[in-house]
Image (tube, helix red, strand yellow):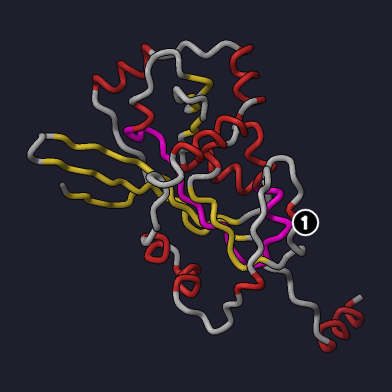
Amino acid sequence: MTSLQRKGPQTRILSTGEEEKLKRDQALVSAFKQQKLEKEAQKNWDLFYKRNSTNFFKDRHWTTREFEELRSCREQHPLYNAERCKVFQCDLTRDDLLDHIPPESVDAVTLIFVLSAVHPEKMHLVLLNVYKVLKPGRSVLFRDYGLNDHAMLRFKAGSKLGENFYVRQDGTRSYFFTDEFLAKLFVDAGYEEVVNEYVFRETVNKKEGLCVPRVFLQSKFRKPPKDPAPTTDSASLLRKEF
């Protein structure tokens, strides 16, 4: 079994059969059930983590390859101090990060397979919350499911909640991003786009004759740096001009 990876500005082109499947599966989950799923979102994810605590989460070595900002985190950094690490549970759509973290004090924020679990109407709340604690000039490092990912095409009829938004059998939900949607989401929250591209991975099992096409969106959005304070000379010049 081998895995191949490449990057590109456009998502994967679907086969005729895949396009027909998506066209057939247009019926949405009822409004009542969708409200119930939103209300029980935390409970459903808590159960998911409980079931998969030992066999789901893996050490993501690729993060330091893809995001240079994280390389010093993996190395034994001389300034690392375990006493400065703070772990807390937080609903990013509702709880204020400033209750735990000083404003504009964070060097990098990772949203790796996080935002897809949030209802699309609440995603902007996450970005605004993060914006408050991120230092000016620093970035949010993002990776999540992309449009036309294999996982999206595996959903059965009756699983669709909205455009590119689906529910799994266990009640957890997943959104599949386009680069345009994500860019608008971040820019509207005050960020600047640095990188925003699709990542394509193919897991090939030649013996079984299987090829699983995965699509992710990998991005970096920066909080704009603050304008430097005017120097004494420039301030004097401004007074002369006016």
- SS of the residue under disc 1: helix
Location of residue 151 in the rendering, given as x and y in whole percent from the top left corner = 36, 32
For residue 195: magenta? no
Q: Residue at x 16, y 35 (%)?
A: 210
Quadrant into which the C terminus falls: bottom right
Residues 78 and 242: in front is: 78
- What type is the residue that disc 1 sits on? Leu
Relative to 102, say whether 57 is above or below: above
The answer to if 128 sits in the magenta stretch is yes
Q: How many marks?
A: 1
Q: Residues within 10 Å of mark 1 (few under 14, many from 20)?
A: few
Which contiguous range is marked in magenta?
Answer: 127-150
Please, which residue is most extreme toward the bottom here? 233
Give coordinates of residue 61: x percent, y percent: 37, 62
Q: Is residue 82 above or below residue 164?
A: below
Residue 149 % position (x, y): 35, 35
The residue lying toward the viewer, choosing from 37 and 123, is 37
| Residue at (58% x, 59% y) in the render | 109
Q: Position of residue 17 (x, y in %)?
A: 24, 19
User: Image check: 79 left or right of 150?
Assistant: right
Q: Compared to 211, does 82 lie above or below?
A: below
Which sits in the foreground, 6 or 110? 110
Residue that badge 1 annotates: 98
